[in-house]
Image (tube, grey):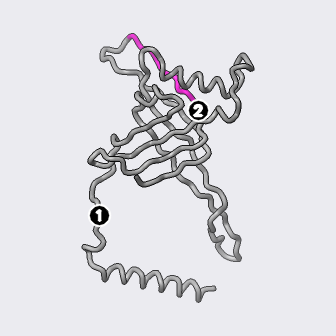
Amino acid sequence: MAKNSISDNDAQLSGLANLAGQGALSRQPDNENFLLQDRFFFQMPRIPKFTYFVQSVSIPPYQYSSVEQPTRFVPIKRPGKNITFDELSVQFLLDEDLQTYFELYNWMNTLQTVSDYDDVEEIEKQYGFASCMVLNSAMKPQFQFKFYNLFPTSLGGFEFNSAITDQEGILTEATFSYSHFELESL
């Protein structure tokens, strides 16, 4: 067992030596521009007015579980079986007619019975789709995150305050669960 790990380490060291011998220019990235926070376009066809007021989107982590293989000495971590997806979080401004709020509020009321069974939609109609297109420094589409079988799980509250002096739009948050997301180059 120890002999295999030594040969694996030797192979990795050999790969590092090859990389060092290639020269600095061959390791330079093709594009030195940074990904910028304000270069995105979010859309959700089920609630189109919501899209216009989106201010930020938190792309959730992509997590793969691991399992521990017991050994006589130190447990060895191995790849697990499950990929987990955290909830998608979106911050948006409220318009003065509350159209964005009502779009989400009405959608959430079709997921479960609040007061009337007639409001609940068939299971196939409860889900939506969302995408977040990432733009490069020239404002051209570069990547797209696609969220499938999406539905709202939380609609944030908001506060009215008559003591403020500078008027600002009211920002709130919505969270969504989904089955999975895909990332594709455009």
Residue 45 lies in the magenta stretch = no
Q: Nearer the viewer, residue 86 or 119?
A: 119
The disc at residue 185 is none
Give residue 4's quadrant in the image. bottom right
Quarter of the view holding residue 30: bottom left
Q: Element under label 2?
A: strand
Q: Which stretch is magenta?
A: 152-162
Q: Decide if residue 185 is on the left or right side of residue 65.
A: left
Is residue 153 in the magenta section? Answer: yes
User: Disc 1 designates what residue?
Assistant: 30
CA gap, disc 1 and disc 2: 39 Å
Q: Is residue 158 above or below residue 125?
A: above
Residue 65 in the image: state x and y as whole percent: 62, 58
Neighbour tally class for label 1: few under 14, some 14-19, many 20 plus, Cα within 10 Å:
few
Q: Quadrant of the N terminus?
A: bottom right
Q: Amino acid at mark 2?
A: Pro
Residue kind at label 1, given as amino acid type: Asp
Q: Residue furthest left?
A: 25
Q: Residue at x 56, y 54 (%)?
A: 63
Task: Name the main secondary structure of what is drawn in magenta.
Answer: loop
Question: As displayed, is residue 18 above or below residue 150?
Answer: below
Q: Nearer the viewer, residue 75 or 182?
A: 182
Count the marks: how many? Answer: 2
* Image spot of residue 119 (x, y percent): 69, 20
Which residue corresponds to mark 2?
152
